[in-house]
Amino acid sequence: MENNPICQLFGIEYPIIQAGMIWCSGWRLASASANSGILGIIGAGSMYPDVLRTHIQKCKQATDKPFAVNVPLLYPDIEQLMEIIVEEGVEIVFTSAGNPRTWTAHLKERGIKVVHVVSSARFAKKAADAGVDAVVAEGFEAGGHNGREETTTMCLIPSVRDAIDIPLIAAGGIGDGRAMLAAMALGADAVQVGSRFVASEESSAHQSFKQEVVNAAEGSTILTLKEITPVRLIKNKFYEDVKASYERGSTVEELRELLGRGRAKKGMFEGNLDEGELEIGQVSGYINNVKPVREIVNEFIETYSLHLKKLKAI
Ligand code: NDP
Ligand code: NDP
């Protein structure tokens, strides 16, 4: 895969990106991913600035391969985070949840490669115009924060491919090598995988949350809270409370109050399966085990190659 534009851009072996995921992707997951030949990402959204610095430093010690940091642009202490990223010599930054024009030039002037995450062809064009090196287009199937328009990966990737000329990474609904092959057939150069890596030994998700991901079946997740920030999560007790609140005709303010603060941490990091927000993608329906990252990556590549061969034989 040495001719793949994403492998060339990041200096990685396989065109797979381990997604930055709040509370789940610390330095252990990012370095295990990097050491398995894919791009690992530290998810900074859930990290106070000093925690991020620690994770970057530990990641540098655990791997000599490239890794990235994901920064949601609505992060409260963003200037501080960006300063740390530059000081620590991080080479690749994935930005999300905000305007790509705000930080792209600043990072690129400092020699950092920038990728922006979008949920529509319109935003992909905006990111390309802002000068990013690549775009992640994430569809409706994805876990966590999501686009409001419910565009599935199947529809999103071809339209983004038509809208931009820079390298394209598909995300949302990619849980194994078959889905990876399909995304590449739709026009993606690489895939970004989140949920499958939540259920890895190295992810920092709580054991109970990992088991909940394994237990999840088809239809276990839903995209909700569109009035605040659309999010795909497991239909647990917290979700039932949200549903009841909608049924009562609650205002946005009442929904915001019900959500409160730190629900994602409570669910995914502390393992409170009733009261926490359990963010995961639709692919959780076919994730049936927790494995080391290296095994997950090897399986992706084997399945991808096998199905590519099958298709060529038709
Ligand atoms: P270490 O292995 O060095 O230490 C883990 C620390 O985190 C211990 O103090 C442990 O507390 C605490 N911890 C572990 N699991 C939980 C949990 N489910 N809920 C609350 N506390 C927990 O950690 P790392 O090197 O992996 O990480 C360094 C720091 O980054 C830690 O403070 C960790 O909590 C944090 N972190 C933050 C992430 C994020 O997304 N914000 C992701 C991963 C880690 P004890 O052993 O005393 O129970
Ligand atoms: P909340 O507002 O509910 O809570 C903030 C959480 O972020 C707390 O748990 C807090 O940890 C932690 N945190 C880490 N750094 C900071 C900081 N500098 N200032 C304040 N809080 C901080 O947010 P969420 O848990 O829903 O989301 C956390 C972050 O991740 C937000 O910035 C959000 O925009 C971002 N994000 C979330 C995604 C998702 O899918 N949910 C996707 C992309 C970005 P503590 O409890 O230890 O104080």
Image (tube, grey):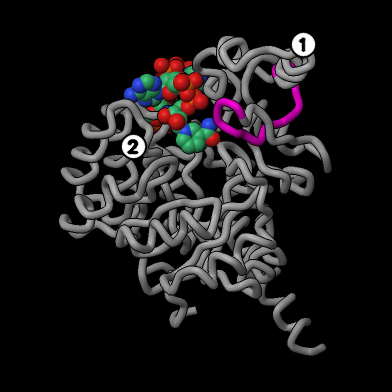
Q: On screen, 115 above or below 288?
A: below
Q: Horizontally, is 12 left or right of 258 in the view?
A: left
Mark 1 residue type: Arg
Which mark is nearer the camera, 1 or 2?
A: 1
Does the image show residue 27?
no
The x and y percentages for residue 20 are 47, 44
Magenta residue check for 233: yes
Tell me the residue that label 1 is attached to. Answer: 248
Tell me the residue that label 2 is attached to. Answer: 55
Does the image show residue 3?
yes
Helix, strand or loop at mark 1? loop
Please identify the quarter of the rendering in which residue 257 is found: top right
The front one of 199 and 82 is 82
Q: On screen, 202 above or below 14?
A: above
Q: Which residues are magenta?
A: 227-238
The x and y percentages for residue 140 are 66, 48
Give me the residue at 19% from left, 59% from top: 111
Q: On screen, 113 above or below 303?
A: above
Q: Horizontally, is 163 left or right of 247 in the view?
A: left
Helix, strand or loop at mark 2? helix
**Disc 2 residue: CB within 8 Å of ligand 1:** yes
The x and y percentages for residue 181 are 66, 71
Q: Horizontally, is 254 left or right of 85 in the view?
A: right
